[in-house]
Amino acid sequence: MTDPTHPAQPGRRMQPETPWSYACGRCGNCCRDKDFILTPYDVARLAQGLGLSTSQTMARYVDPSRPTLKTGPDAWCVFFEPGQGCQVRQSRPAICRLYPLGRTVASEGGIVFEEAEPHPETKGRYGMAGTVADYLQSQELGPYLEALSLIGAFLDDCFAVADRAGVLDQLDAAVFAYWTGEAGPVPFNILGQDLLAARTPFASPLDQLKAHLEALRPLCGLDVPPRDQPALRDDPEGRAKIGRLVVTGAVFGVGLGLSPGFSALQP
Ligand code: SF4
C-alpha cells in the first residue's frame, strides 16, 4: 500500500538528510522474485548469525554460480518462512536492510540513495516522518555501508591499475561475468583459505573483510605506487602480467571467498 499523500517515487535520488521514511508492512513481498545480491561482508555476518563458517554458509545458502542468496519454491528467499518472515533478521544482508532504497555511486561522485520500484502489492508505507539517515540508522546499516565503501575503494584502485595496464575492458568484463554468473563457479575457497589462514581469528566480520582486501592488494599490484612500477609504465609484458593479476584480484575482492574456512565465531 502506498500513502497517496506520500507515494513511492521510484528512481528518486536522495541524500542522507532528505526527508523520507518507510514503514515495513511485513507482507514479505520484497523477499521473493529478486536477485538478493551479497557482498563478502554479508556472508561473514550471515555466518556469524548462523554459527557457521563462511564456507558452510555459502554451500548451504548461496547460489553456487552467482553472488546471490538461493531461492526456494515460488522464488522466495531461502530464509523466508511463510507466516513467520525472515529467519535471519539480525544478520540479514545489506540489500534487505536498505530496501526500498538502493545505494548508488553518483556520476558526479559521492553516494546517493535511490528509491526502488515498489512491489505492486506492498504493504509498506512511505512517508516523511524522518530522513534517509534515520532510516539507515534504524536498519543498523553502519558497518554494512562501511563494508561497501571499503569494497568500492578497493575496486576503484583495481580499475586505476587496470587503466594504466591497458586492461580496463578485461576488468569490466570479468567483474560483470562474475556478478551475472556467466563466469560460473569460482573456486574462492581454495585461494581464500591460503590467503587468510595466518590472519585468524578476526575480532569482527568487518576486520575479516579488511584482512581479505589487504591480503589481496600485493597480489594485484595495488601496494606499489605507479612511479615505482616500471613494469606498468615501460614494459608491455610486465603491464600485461599486472593487468592479469589485477583482473583476478578484483574479482576476488568482490567475490564471496571471504576467509572461507572461518567465521568470526569459529576461528
Ligand atoms: S534474508 Fe530475510 S529479509 Fe532478506 S530476502 Fe531473505 S527473508 Fe527477506
Image: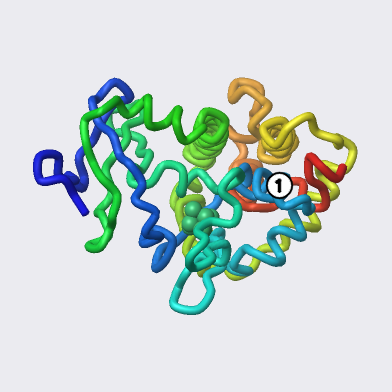
Color style of the picture: rainbow
Give the quarter of the image for residue 143: top right
Res. 139 in view: yes
In the displayed structure image, the side of residue 199 where residue 84 appears, left or right: left
Q: Position of residue 9 (x, y in %)?
A: 17, 44
Residue denoted by label 1 = 258
* Most foreground residue, 254 or 248: 254
Looking at the rendered image, the quarter that the C terminus falls into is top right
Residue at 85% x, 48% y is 194
The quarter of the displayed image where residue 225 is located: top right
Identify the residue shown where x is 52% and y is 41%: 162
Q: Say which of 112 and 164 sits in front.
A: 112
Residue type (three-letter) at the residue carrying disc 1:
Leu
The correct choice, above or below, for 94 with respect to 206 in the image is: below
Q: Left or right: 90 with respect to 115?
A: right
Foreground pick, 74 / 218: 74
Q: Position of residue 145 (x, y in %)?
A: 50, 32
Q: Quadrant of the N terminus?
A: bottom left
Q: Position of residue 87 (x, y in %)?
A: 59, 57
In the current view of this chain or complex, which residue is farthest to the front? 83
Q: Nearer the viewer, residue 256 or 162?
A: 256
Q: Is residue 11 above or below residue 199?
A: below
